[in-house]
Each structure stands twice: as structure tokens, then as C-alpha cells.
Image (spheres, rainbow, N blue to C red):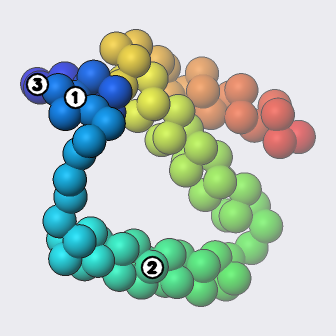
Amino acid sequence: MARNIWNWQQKNWPHFSYNEDALYTLELKFSQNTGTVLGAFKHVNEKEKEQLIIEILSNEALKTSEIEGEYLDRDSIQSSIKKTLA
């Protein structure tokens, strides 16, 4: 698996370029997906909302740790999040 590198490690940092059209499409898709999630979130009960938040936060923690080269235990992360939310 290719390792992602930080922006400041890119050879052209900080003078980078990007494709505005490609970003526009991604931004639009992100915005649409966000609306869908927010709409769905309004129709679930409190216990389901809490579980969804735990899933989102633990997924983010796992992905962030992978970027750093660390691999955490999902159950441990979720347990910690549950304690924090209580």
C-alpha cells in the first residue's frame, strides 16, 4: 500500500496546483451526501444517533491513526468514546 505523505512533504510545497473542475464535482457530491445524512439523522431515535456518532468518531480515529502508521483497536476506541459521551 502506498503511504500518503503530508502536504508539506510534497516536492512543490507550498506552490501546488489543483483542478478546480475536479474539486467542484467532489464538493458538490460532499454537499449532497451531507444533506442526505443530516436528513436521515433527524429520523432516528436517540440510541441510534449515539451509535452513529460513535461509529463516525471511531472511523475517523482509525483513519487518522493509519495515516500516522498506527493501527488501533476499534472496540477499544468505541469503548473510550462511549465513556466520554456518558
Residue at mark 2: 31
- Snapshot quadrant of residue 62: top left
- Is residue 71 visible in this depiction of the protein? no
Q: Could you tell me which residue is drawn at 55 percent across and 50 percent down?
A: 56
Instruction: Answer with mark 1 or mark 2, whichever residue precedes in sequence.
Output: 1
Instruction: Answer with mark 3 or mark 1, whichever residue precedes in sequence.
Output: 3
Q: Nearer the viewer, mark 3 or mark 1?
A: 1
Figure quadrant of the C terminus: top right
Picture coordinates of residue 68 (x, y %)? 39, 18
16 sits left or right of 32 in the view: left
Instruction: Answer with mark 2 or mark 3, whichever residue precedes in sequence.
Output: 3
Say what amino acid the circle numbered 1 marks: Gln
Label 2 CA crowd tier, 10 Å (few <14, some 14–19, many 20+): few
Quick one: SS at disc 3?
A: loop
Per the rendering, the mark at residue 10 is 1
18 sits left or right of 56 in the view: left
86 sits left or right of 54 in the view: right
Q: Could you tell me which residue is drawn at 19 percent across and 33 percent down?
A: 12
Q: Nearer the viewer, mark 2 or mark 3?
A: 2
Picture coordinates of residue 79 (x, y %)? 68, 28
Label 3 CA crowd tier, 10 Å (few <14, some 14–19, many 20+): few
- Give the vertical position of 85 relative to 79 (above or below): below
- 59 vs 5, nearest the viewer: 5
- Snapshot quadrant of residue 77: top right
Picture coordinates of residue 14 (x, y %)? 32, 36
